[in-house]
């Protein structure tokens, strides 16, 4: 009886952990913003990730397009297109309902909040 009870507890714990796991592909979709200093001026940067894999970024009157692919719950590949050129980078991410952290290959962390 104790063995069965122990197995039930383990199964319930595993079920809770698996349902609590973040689903970055769904959670990242939406508008995000952050503020960053550029040349001593605080600038608002807005990034939108769409469900179809497209993304856009706007700041200081500039609009930049691109695409993205969630490679895992902690890794994101982004391709930015600007002035006829494109650049692809893979970054680490931590995403939740209202916050997104992006860590580049140099270890720089950008913290964004979801636009409501």
Image (cartoon, rainbow, N blue to C red):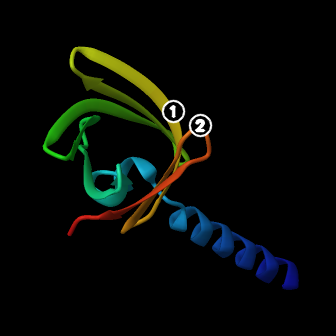
Q: Is residue 77 left or right of residue 29?
A: right
* Image quarter hosting the N terminus: bottom right
The disc placed on residue 90 is 1
Q: Nearer the viewer, residue 95 or 59?
A: 59
* Image quarter hosting the C terminus: bottom left
Horizontal and vertical percent position of residue 67: 30, 30
Q: Residue at x 22, y 34 (%)?
A: 64
CB under 8 Å between discs 2 and 1: yes
Mark 2 sits on what residue? 105
Q: Is residue 94 left or right of residue 14?
A: left
Q: Residue at x 25, y 43 (%)?
A: 51
Q: Residue furthest left?
A: 61
Q: Local crowd at mark 2 within 10 Å, few (<14), some, or many (≥20)?
A: few
**Upstream in the sequence, badge 2 or badge 1?**
1
Residue 31 in view here: no
What's the distance in space between the residues labelled 2 and 1, CA to CA? Answer: 8 Å
Q: Residue at x 29, y 51 (%)?
A: 29
Horizontal and vertical percent position of residue 98: 36, 68
Horizontal and vertical percent position of residue 96: 44, 64
Reply above or below: 43 against 13. above
Q: Residue furthest front?
A: 40
Residue 74 in view here: yes
């Amino acid at each position: 009886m104790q063995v069965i009870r122990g197995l039930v507890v383990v199964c319930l714990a595993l079920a809770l952990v698996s349902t609590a796991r973040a689903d970055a592909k769904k959670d990242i979709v939406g508008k995000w913003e952050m503020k960053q200093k550029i040349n001593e001026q605080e600038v608002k940067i807005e990034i939108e990730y769409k469900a179809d894999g497209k993304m856009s970024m706007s700041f200081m009157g500039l609009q930049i397009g691109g695409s993205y692919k969630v490679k895992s719950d902690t890794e994101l590949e982004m391709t930015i297109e600007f002035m006829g050129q494109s650049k692809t980078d893979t970054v680490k991410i931590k995403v939740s309902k209202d916050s997104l952290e992006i860590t580049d290959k140099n270890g720089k962390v950008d913290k964004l909040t979801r636009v409501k």
